Every structure is written in C-alpha cells, then in structure tokens.
Amino acid sequence: MPYDKKSELPDQVKDNLLKKHAQEIYKEAFNSASEQYDQEKTAHKVAWSAVKEKYTKNENDNWVKKDD
C-alpha cells in the first residue's frame, strides 16, 4: 500500500523520523519498493535502508542528517 502523504506513514516511522526530509525519503523509497516487491515487509526494509544512506542515529538515539 503506497503512501500519498507523510501523514499516512506508520506511527513508528513518524515517531522515529522527526525530520520531514527523512520522512519524505522513507515514503518515496517505500512506494518505489512496494511496486517492485510483493511483500510489504520488504518495502519497509528498503525504505529504512534509504533513510540510513542520508541519516544516522546519534548518541541520544535520534535520527540526524549525515555530514556530506
């Protein structure tokens, strides 16, 4: 099930990814992966991998943008 808006993302995603940019990355990656793969679980894994390319968790367990 693709997401049309960031507000439709699962609460776990919104609660962990406070930055709107990170949520947008997740949404776009999930939607793309859901077209490629039959399993929703796989699409979520792909989406988290996409977020991890640009964001990392800091010492406070918050997702922050990586330095370029």
Image: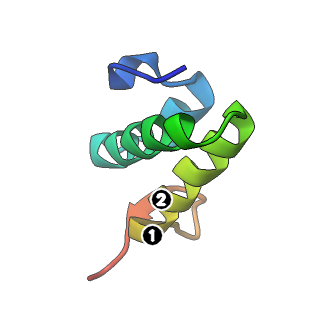
- Disc 2: CA contacts within 10 A as few (<14), some (14-19) or many (>=20): some
| Residue 12 screen position, x and y as percent | 62, 31
| Residue 39 screen position, x and y as percent | 72, 34
20 on left or right of 10: left
Q: Are marks 2 and 1 in contact (CB under 8 Å)?
A: yes
- Residue positioned 58% across, 52% down in the render: 46
Which quadrant of the rendered structure holds the N terminus? Answer: top right
- Type of amino acid under label 1: Glu
Q: Which mark is residue 12?
A: none
Badge 2 is on which residue? 50
Which quadrant of the rendered structure holds the C terminus? Answer: bottom left
Badge 1 is on which residue? 53
- Residue positioned 53% across, 48% down in the render: 47
Assign a secondary structure to mark 1. Answer: helix
Say which of 58 and 43 sits in front: 43
Assign a secondary structure to mark 2. Answer: helix
State the CA–CA distance, disc 2 to disc 1: 5 Å
49 on left or right of 6: right
Give the residue at the far bottom of this rendering.
68
| Residue 10 screen position, x and y as percent | 57, 24
Q: Quadrant of residue 61?
A: bottom right
Rendered image coloring scheme: rainbow
